[in-house]
């Protein structure tokens, strides 16, 4: 559903083409739940391994950049990648963050 908070309701008609371009380009929003977990889709079954890694690194970097200034200590405690209906695979947080920073630069 369109929602002003997510930017899918446009008040100014001149902004409509830009919003449509963003959505078609694959804009992804992320939020954390009550326990601090972030669930985000990074790809589809048809994606190559390189595309999935690229999306993972960009998502991790975006989450790290969105870290509130008031948050102290370790921001990422664990990372898991999983299919919709399957077991998760734990990722090494330090390695993933390092690779994400190197990829995005």
Image (cartoon, rainbow, N blue to C red):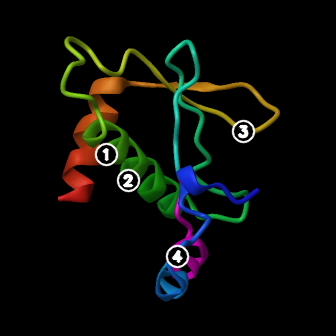
Furthest residue toward right: 85
Distance Cα–Cα, label 1 vs label 4: 23 Å
Q: Position of residue 84 (x, y in %)?
A: 77, 38
State the predominant SS element of the stretch in magenta.
Answer: helix
Q: Badges 1 and 3: C-beta atoms under 8 Å apart?
A: no
Numbered label tally: 4
Quickly name the residue at label 3. Answer: 83
Vertical position of residue 9 compared to residue 97: above or below = below
Q: Badges 1 and 4: C-beta atoms under 8 Å apart?
A: no
Q: Badges 2 and 1: C-beta atoms under 8 Å apart?
A: yes
> How would you rate the neighbour count of disc 1 (Cα within 10 Å): few for under 14, some for 14-19, many for 20 or more?
many
Q: Residue at x 46, y 48 (%)?
A: 56
Q: Position of residue 97 (x, y in %)?
A: 28, 35
Distance Cα–Cα, label 2 vs label 4: 21 Å
Quadrant in which residue 25 is drawn? bottom right
Vertical position of residue 65 compared to residue 47: above or below = above
Q: Badges 3 and 2: C-beta atoms under 8 Å apart?
A: no
Q: Secondary structure at mark 1?
A: helix
Quickly name the residue at label 2. Answer: 58
Q: Which of the two marks, 1 or 4, is nearer to us in this view?
A: 4
| Quarter of the figure that contains the C terminus | bottom left
Q: Which mark is residue 19?
A: 4
């Amino acid at each position: 559903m369109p929602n002003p908070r997510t930017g899918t309701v446009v008040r100014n008609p001149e902004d409509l083409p830009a919003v449509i371009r963003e959505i078609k380009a694959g804009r992804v929003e992320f939020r954390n739940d009550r326990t601090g977990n972030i669930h985000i889709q990074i790809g589809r079954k048809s994606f190559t391994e390189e595309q999935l890694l690229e999306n993972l690194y960009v998502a991790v970097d975006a989450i790290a950049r969105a870290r509130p200034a008031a948050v102290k200590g370790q921001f990422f405690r664990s990372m898991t990648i999983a299919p919709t209906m399957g077991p998760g695979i734990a990722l090494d947080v330090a390695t993933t963050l390092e690779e994400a920073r190197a990829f995005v630069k």
